[in-house]
């Protein structure tokens, strides 16, 4: 799986991602006002990951909805379990089809190599479910609340529109500043003490990446969004052996999105005040549910 997400393999997806971006942007341009999350921020990562997993176009919306339910903070445990099961069934269907007749897609290549490495169809379907969920929610919200933040700090948006070559740094600064995946969850494997706090073996630990990414010992004026900031080592994609597998893909999607939007819609503005927006109150992923925009 890691081979599929390495820089070079991901870079090959650039033309296809750029085309999806242009297509979504072209549809948005037909209206004066749009709801950005449903018009662009959600369908971009969703289309990309669904194509990698050879999900037929007609099923994308149902899968977005199932994926969202698996991460819901308000659903009961039984509802979350049912959504995980439903998504699992769907992915087992895709994997069975790919094992019988691998398509020329990422999941087709994974199906072929799973036979070689003796990985069961069940495990492959679980991994695909993980990719589908991980590949959706995070990037969707990074694009949504990312645009919101740039528009709130208009001079940063103007700078990006005037100099789109800054997009790589802008994306990393948004990742740091917003830290949409806010926490890591771990279980202590031994007794330890951190900064005077005792943690016992077996205790659950939540690591707040948001706080680490605003550490003033690491970042100058950490609470300021500054797309000219030199690239620092932020923790938005986690750290260590579980570092985000999709980091290169997420960066590429965000770069294509913000480059295009800053060039095609330099005059875009927020059509709602910050306190009118419906924020995600789920601690897992930061963002807004809707983002109304005026395009001209
Ligand atoms: C802006 C977008 C994204 C952010 C902020 C993000 C953030 C993260 C973070 C913080 C982790 C570490 C979790 C932990 O250590 O417990 C992680 C893991 C992971 N991410 Fe992402 N992610 C993003 C996009 C993606 C995409 C597009 C994919 C796949 C298509 C993806 C797939 C994964 C997978 C499979 C893991 C688990 C890696 C492992 O446990 O070895 N992520 N991500």
Image (cartoon, rainbow, N blue to C red):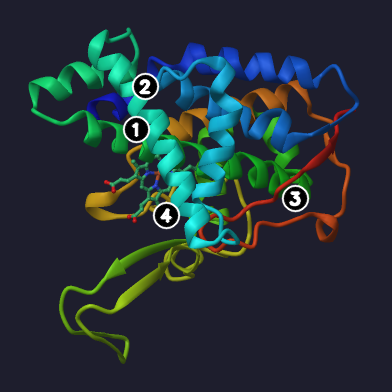
The residue tagged 4 is: 234
**Residue 85, above or below 59:** below
Separation (CA) of disc 4 from disc 1: 27 Å
The residue tagged 3 is: 153
Residue in the picture at 52% in, 54% down: 79
* Numbered badge on residue 94: 2
Q: Given contact means CB atoms under 8 Å apart, are the residues at marks 1 and 3 in contact?
A: no
Q: On the rendered structure, is 269 left or right of 20? A: right
Q: Given contact means CB atoms under 8 Å apart, are the residues at marks 2 and 1 in contact?
A: yes
Secondary structure under tag 3 reads: loop
Around disc 4, counting alpha carbons within 10 Å, would you say few (fewer than 14), some (14 to 19), or many (20 or more)? Answer: many
Label 4 vs 2, first from the N-terminus: 2
The residue tagged 1 is: 128
Disc 2 vs disc 1: which is toward the camera?
Answer: 2
Label 1 vs 3, first from the N-terminus: 1
**Residue 165, above or below 102:** below
Residue 88 seen in the figure: yes
Q: Given contact means CB atoms under 8 Å apart, are the residues at marks 4 and 1 in contact?
A: no
Ligand 1, seen in the image, is in the quarter at top left
Secondary structure under tag 1 reads: helix
Residue 194 image position (x, y, % from top left): 28, 83
Residue 230 seen in the figure: no
Q: On the rendered structure, is 270 left or right of 22? A: right
Q: Quadrant of residue 155?
A: top right
Q: Nearer the viewer, residue 246 or 77?
A: 77
């Amino acid at each position: 799986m890691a081979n599929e997400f390495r820089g070079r393999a991901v870079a090959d997806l650039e033309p296809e991602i750029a085309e999806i971006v242009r297509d979504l942007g072209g549809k948005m341009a037909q209206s004066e006002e749009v709801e950005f999350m449903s018009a662009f921020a959600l369908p971009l990562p969703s289309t990309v990951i669904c194509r990698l997993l050879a999900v037929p176009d007609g099923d994308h919306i149902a899968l977005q909805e199932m994926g969202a339910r698996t991460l819901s903070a308000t659903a009961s445990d039984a509802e979350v379990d049912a959504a995980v099961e439903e998504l699992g069934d769907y992915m087992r269907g895709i994997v069975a089809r790919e094992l019988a007749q691998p398509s020329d897609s990422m999941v087709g290549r994974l199906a072929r190599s799973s036979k070689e490495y003796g990985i069961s169809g069940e495990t492959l379907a679980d991994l695909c479910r993980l990719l589908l969920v991980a590949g959706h929610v995070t990037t969707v919200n990074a694009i949504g609340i990312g645009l919101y933040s740039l528009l709130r700090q208009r001079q940063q948006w103007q700078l990006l529109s005037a100099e789109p070559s800054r997009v790589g740094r802008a994306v990393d600064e948004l990742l740091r500043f917003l830290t949409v995946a806010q926490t890591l969850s771990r279980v202590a494997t031994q007794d330890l003490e951190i900064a005077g706090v005792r943690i016992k073996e077996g205790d659950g630990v939540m690591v707040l990446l948001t706080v680490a990414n605003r550490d003033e010992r690491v970042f100058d004026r950490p609470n300021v969004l500054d797309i000219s900031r030199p690239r620092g080592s932020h923790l938005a994609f986690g750290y260590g052996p579980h570092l985000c597998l999709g980091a290169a893909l997420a960066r590429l999607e965000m770069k294509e999105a913000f480059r295009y939007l800053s060039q095609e819609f330099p005059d875009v503005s927020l059509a709602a005040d910050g306190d009118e927006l419906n924020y995600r109150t789920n601690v897992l992923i930061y963002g807004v549910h809707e983002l109304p925009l005026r395009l001209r």
